[in-house]
Image (tube, rainbow, N blue to C red):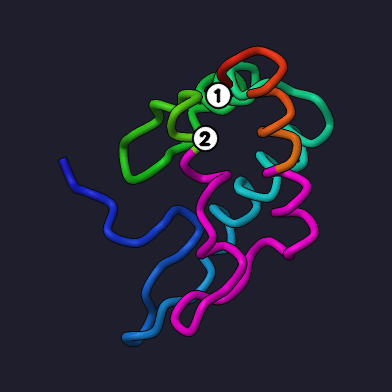
Amino acid sequence: MKNRTLPYGYCCKNGVIVIEPQESKVLKRIYAAYLDGSSMLTIAEQLNREKMEYRDGVTGWNKGRLKHLMDNTKYLGTEVYPPIIDQATYEKMQKTMNNLSEEFGSI
């Protein structure tokens, strides 16, 4: 099994890390669905039904994988990673997750 070395949403072209168009669309879709009130379980189930790959040949979406993607600050952009998610969206996501965590004890 091939391990993912770059975060979901990125690929390497000519030695430079760039946004992978299809994966970045999925990532933005995940953020939007969650902010619109969908649970991580519902989002994971939908991605699995669509057989959306997390990496080549792997379609095992789950709440843990989604939380990892939602917490990843690299999506804001760094010296190496181009931004996929804007700061306001990221902060809103974190606030939503923290509110749910406080309300229910876990996500």
Question: Residue sitting at 21 percent across and 48 percent down?
Answer: 3
Dividing the image into 4 quarters, which one contains the N terminus? top left
Question: Residue sitting at 68 percent across and 50 percent down?
Answer: 28
**What crowding class fits label 1: few (fewer than 14 Cα within 10 Å), some (14-19), or many (20 or more)?**
many
* Whole-number angstrom distance, CA of label 2 to CA of label 1: 7 Å
Residue nearest the viewer, comparing 10 with 41: 41
State the image coordinates of residue 75 (x, y, percent, origin top left). Answer: 57, 62
Question: Residue sitting at 61 percent across and 67 percent down?
Answer: 76
Q: Element at badge 2?
A: helix
The answer to whether residue 53 is magenta is no
Note whether 18 is above or below 28 in the view shown: below
Q: Amino acid at mark 2?
A: Leu
Note whether 80 is above or below 26 in the view shown: below
Q: Amino acid at mark 1?
A: Ala
The residue at which mark 1 appears reads as: 44
Dividing the image into 4 quarters, which one contains the C terminus? top right
Which quadrant of the view contains residue 87?
Answer: bottom right
Question: Residue sitting at 39 percent across and 84 percent down?
Answer: 16
Tag 2 near tag 1, CB within 8 Å: yes
Furthest toward the left, the residue is 1
Q: Which mark is residue 62?
A: none
Residue nearest the viewer, comparing 8 with 22: 8
Q: Classify residue 71 as left or right of residue 31.
A: left
Note whether 94 is above or below 66 in the view shown: below
State the image coordinates of residue 81 (x, y, percent, origin top left). Answer: 49, 75
The residue at which mark 2 appears reads as: 66
Q: Element at badge 1?
A: helix
- Sequence-wise, the earlier of marks 2 and 1 is 1
Find the magenta span and give its range. Answer: 68-94
